[in-house]
Amino acid sequence: MEFQVLGPVSVSGSDGPLPLGPAKRRSLLAMLLLRANVAVSVDTLTEALWDDEPPLHARTVIQGHVSRLRALLAGVDASAYGVELSTRGSAYHLELPETLLDAHRFDGLVALARRATDPGDRAALLTEALALWQGPALAGAYPSPLLRSAAHTLDEARLAAVELLADTYVAGGEHERAVQLLRPETGAHPLREPLAARLVEALHHAGRSSEALDAYHRARQVLADQLGARPGAELTAAFTGALGPESAPAVRVETPQPVLESVQLRPNLLPRTPRGFHGRTVESAALTAAAAGPDGPVVVVTGPAGVGKTALAVRWAADRHSDFPDGTLYADLRGFSDTSDPEPAELLREFLVALGVPPRRMPESADAAGALFRSLTAELRLLVVLDNARTSAQVRPLLPTGPGCVTVVTSRARLAGLVASDAARVLALDVLATDDSVALLTRLLGEHRTAADPQAARRTAELCGGLPLALRVAAARLVELPALGLASFADRLADERQRLELLAAEDIGVASALRLTTAHLPADAAQQFTALGHHPGTHVDRFSAAALAGTTPPDAARALDRLVAAHLLTETAPGRYVLHDLVRLYARGQSRDPAARAAARLRLYDHCVATALSASEAAEPGGEPAFVQPDDFQQPPAVRDFTSREEAIGWFAAERDDLALIAAAASAEDRPERAWRIAVTQWPLVVWRVLADWAPTLEAALADARSCADPYAEARVLTLLGWVLAEEGRTAEAVRHLRVAPELAACAGDVLGEATALVNLAAALPDDEPGAAETACTRALALATEADDAHTRMLALQHLARIHLGAGRHRQAYEAAEVALGLGPEHEAVARRVLLRTWQGEALAGLGDTVAGRRCLARAALEAERTGYDAGAVTALDALLHIADQDALPELRRRHAAAHARIRAR
């Protein structure tokens, strides 16, 4: 319900304006409203309704109008709003809350504006106040002298507010806004010099001096024509200022008065401190440090759903309540919930009520309420906790201005906009360490229960991924089922198919928290998140993400950034992302379309193969591809480029675990032709780290190759597996595999594959079969020469050199190595070059040229160490130790031991 006198006199109910009837009745209502909550005598009402001698029956007329007004008010249930029109002897009393009358709200807003210290806040309050006006005051009422005087007073108050708003715009440098405000007002009130003076000044300082002078001359002419008067001092000063280009604006903003009446309240709106809170000592200290400072700091506590952001913020705020003598405010912004976001005005009113603002002074618009809040907090030491924000825009209207105030915001998003606009400091909250997770479980369950099976308690904590929400729900489940042991519960949690279901209790759970997070994702990020559920591994980059989603790497990168901002992904290294185990399970549950899953997985398999081939070319340039692609191979639209051997080997090492998981997934999904290729394509890392337990991976690949019934596939896998087994000392197994591989390759027409298998067989044959080894290498060299493949020829010559060396044929060993080194450019495979120089150095020493032999071996060892080829470094240093000078031995032994240690560390 609302009563209006700032414009037509009216009363509005829920269904719109009430039919007040004739002007006399409106006049009576206007008089009662102007003196609301005060008894108005019949004589005063008579004076308001008639401007000359009233009729003899005036009292009866007034009684009739009062009766009709009562009926109208009763019809809209005005008493429910606290409105009552009663008789008090020979007077009438209209009781109503002041907030229902527009004139009272106007006066309150203007009073607040005069006290505001910030021009933007003052402008917002004044704008809201002036918006209450719907025309000249008391329009539609009988124009008696009494009511004309009252209307004039109201109109003057409005014009004063207009002038104050204009001055506020000028003080803030918003001269054009001042011009737009003043032009229609000077037209409506041409004889009001203060308005004209302000228009002249505003035009001048807006850079429109000629228009300013025109405005002055028009005002001067109106004064002369209608009043026969000259411009007063204020208008003349404005004119003089417009003439001078360096003049400064004559700002009239009043000196700010003290903030509203002294507030004695010390509000505390914090919710209950969470029970069972444990740990976060380091994070609490970091929050204290971030909240320190004299500039009203804003701290954003950010992290994934369920990580305990609210718990930390509320606990920290409760512990420091005494540091903020003016109180603590709290609001849940519901940024990630099923309900709609609260309106800023709604939250600001809650804050203002807590700070002691009476309802009659409460602004209605969010802008005006924000202005009042900022004004009130300018001198306070206040803590504001804004929980569960989704965007920076939600937060900004609720920020206090006082330098002694601190604002703590919690969000699943990064809120980078708040960092940019308000210099917010960010505290990223991660999952709990395992020890802290176990301690939290203990506090929730009781020490007797976790102490009974500490190993199961630790396993449960690990399966919850250190996520406090998951730990709390797990504890709730265990409390709910007292007969269920921790070990049994951990066994259930270990089953990924039911883990998320177990980590849900009523309306609280990991899945529901993640659902609320993903519900607010943009479409591209949501699509990417669902696609990540198809990934059988743990890490992604923009290329693998693009393969899964069927997009491009730039599109995937943008989506991944959004997922990181929502804390659904963690960037563990530049461009490398990982999903928390529980998030991964949730994403997997979102991707239920078998066809989409199969298509995404196939794109991922081919992406892995294409990327590994690109890395192989960088790691071992010039070599033949590890295999030919299947007929249905889908070349990705973009493949990562590798600029160096080190980068390529680093990629292989970083992706080894994921490639194993991906190969296993391909095998399980009846894609053996992809599975064995994903395994074999890692051969450069196998060469460089041959003793890093490669046999299980390659044995699984062999099973996949055999399931393809493809001799080409089986030969390729056997060749690499046999070499690995030989290097591990499992000679008999190696030779058994490598005797079969050349025949299979020949059957498949794979000439270079046959040559490579023969070379590996020669390397694996025991020392008592030197003739067979030499025969195999000679045959391999002939095949490579026939195929005109320099890379494979080098490989065959390398092993021939080793065989000659073992047989004491030093000259032939040297020459074979020399020919091999001449076949490839300087950037040819490092491992091969290191070994060739090693054999060459040993051959030189065997020929009696020890100095040249040392030099050659030293060069091989240094190159191996420099490039990270530790196996080659051990071989070269081992040979060098046999012919080195005595004074060089200690350093050589140190380097030899260091290379061995690096191999063992892998």
Image (cartoon, grey):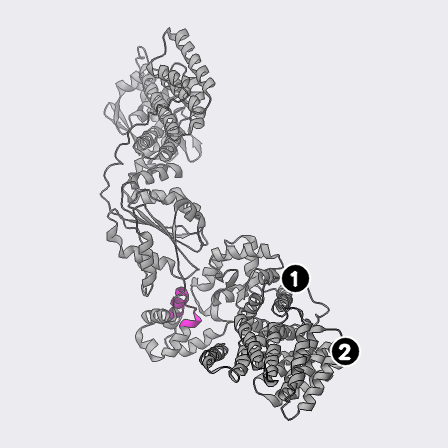
User: Can residue 707 be seen from the camera position used here?
Assistant: no
Query: Main SS type for the magenta part?
Result: helix
Give the quarter of the image for residue 36. Answer: top left
552 to 761, vertically: above or below: above
Q: Tell whether position 471 is magenta.
A: yes
User: Can residue 307 be seen from the camera position used here?
Assistant: yes
- Which residue is identified by label 2? 749
- Which residue is identified by label 1? 636
Q: Is residue 885 left or right of residue 781?
A: left
The amino acid pointed to by label 1 is Pro
Q: Tell whether position 789 is magenta.
A: no
Query: In front here: 262 or 148?
Result: 262
The amino acid pointed to by label 2 is Gly
Q: CA distance from mark 2 to mark 1?
A: 28 Å
Question: How many labels, in total?
Answer: 2
In the rendering, at what x and y percent does residue 324 appear? 26, 49
In the rendering, at what x and y percent does residue 680 appear? 63, 75
Query: In front here: 104 or 475?
Result: 475
Q: Nearer the viewer, mark 2 or mark 1?
A: 2
Query: In front here: 691 or 831?
Result: 831
In the rendering, at what x and y percent does residue 730 appear? 58, 88
Range drawn in magenta = 461-475
